[in-house]
Every structure is written in structure tokens, then in C-alpha cells.
Amino acid sequence: MEEKELSCPFQKVFGPGMCEMHRRFHEMIAAPGQRMISVVRGAGVPVDIRDLEDEVAVVADLPGVGSGDVAVRLTGPMALRITVRKREEEREGYAVRERLSGEMTRVVNLPADVTEEGATATLRDGVLAVRLKKVPGQGVEIPVREE
């Protein structure tokens, strides 16, 4: 059975040379007899961001994490920081260890200015959902007059 070729996310932007480097990198980190390990983006905190009419919604998968182990902070009008503390499990006896533990932080760049007023963050079944209200009227227009 032929192994499916690893897709290259760099082909369109950087060309085939970068794809070859990407392929070789994955070959180097793959354990013998194991599938290639995907590169973990965002320090292990994958997110989806939705730009809705009057709010921004951020959803993050945090399996096995309780609400006391998550901190969500609006660090600016267009930046959200998610910090997760995952307890380290026993280190011995593992043949392969891919699940992350320790502290992970992800800074999310938001698509619009938001405010902390009315913001909510909920964790249900390992899924963090953050909803942030957009700042109304992105700025004030300054009239230009001719001199």
C-alpha cells in the first residue's frame, strides 16, 4: 500500500523548493514505523475565528482541560491571549508521546477592534468559546476642507 504524500502548504507562495524542505523536515522528525507528525501550529492551541456582524467569535479545542486551567485575556483592541496549563503526566513507560503538557499560550490576532464589555468565555466538553463585541463605528471621520 502506497503512503499518501504529505501535502505542502507552501507550494503556492514559495514554490517546490520549500516543499522539498518541508518533506525532508517531516521525514527527520518522524519516528521509525510511525506516521509523520504534523507541525503543531499556535503552540498546541488550535483556534477558529469568526468575524460576525457585531461580534468576533473565537473557538479553541482544549481537550482534557478544566475551566480553572484556562486564562483568557484581551490584551488590546485586536488581540486575545489564551493560556492553558495542562498537568504533566508520568514521564516513564511511553513509547511515543505526542500530546502536549505544561503551559501553552496562544495570542490570537482579531479581525476587528473589540471591547471587554459584554465579553463571554465558556468551556464545554473541551471546547473554549469566546465572544467579544465589536467596537461600534470604527473611529470618527474628520472632514477635509480646501484652503
Image (cartoon, rainbow, N blue to C red):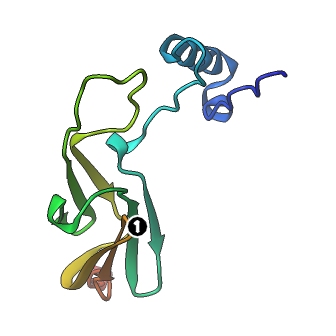
Q: Is residue 128 left or right of residue 101?
A: right
Query: Can residue 66 be seen in the rendering of this structure?
Result: yes
Residue 115 placement: quadrant: bottom left
Q: Is residue 95 left or right of residue 74?
A: right
As shown in the figure, which amino acid type bears the numbered disc 1?
Val
Quadrant containing the N terminus in the rendered view: top right
Q: Nearer the viewer, residue 79 or 60?
A: 60
Quadrant containing the C terminus in the rendered view: bottom left
Q: Nearer the viewer, residue 60 or 78?
A: 60
Query: Can residue 111 be seen in the rendering of this structure?
Result: no
Residue 129 placement: quadrant: bottom left
**Residue 27 x, y percent position in the rendering:** 57, 13
Q: Is residue 109 left or right of residue 16?
A: left
**Residue 131 x, y percent position in the rendering:** 33, 79
Q: Nearer the viewer, residue 92 or 132?
A: 92
Pointer 1 residue? 59
Residue under the image location 29 percent in, 73 percent down: 113
**Residue 55 x, y percent position in the rendering:** 38, 82
Residue under the image location 61 percent in, 31 percent down: 10
Please determine whether, in this image, residue 56 is positioned above or below residue 104: below
Please determine whether, in this image, residue 99 is positioned above or below residue 34: below
| Furthest residue toward front | 93
Residue under the image location 19 percent in, 45 percent down: 87
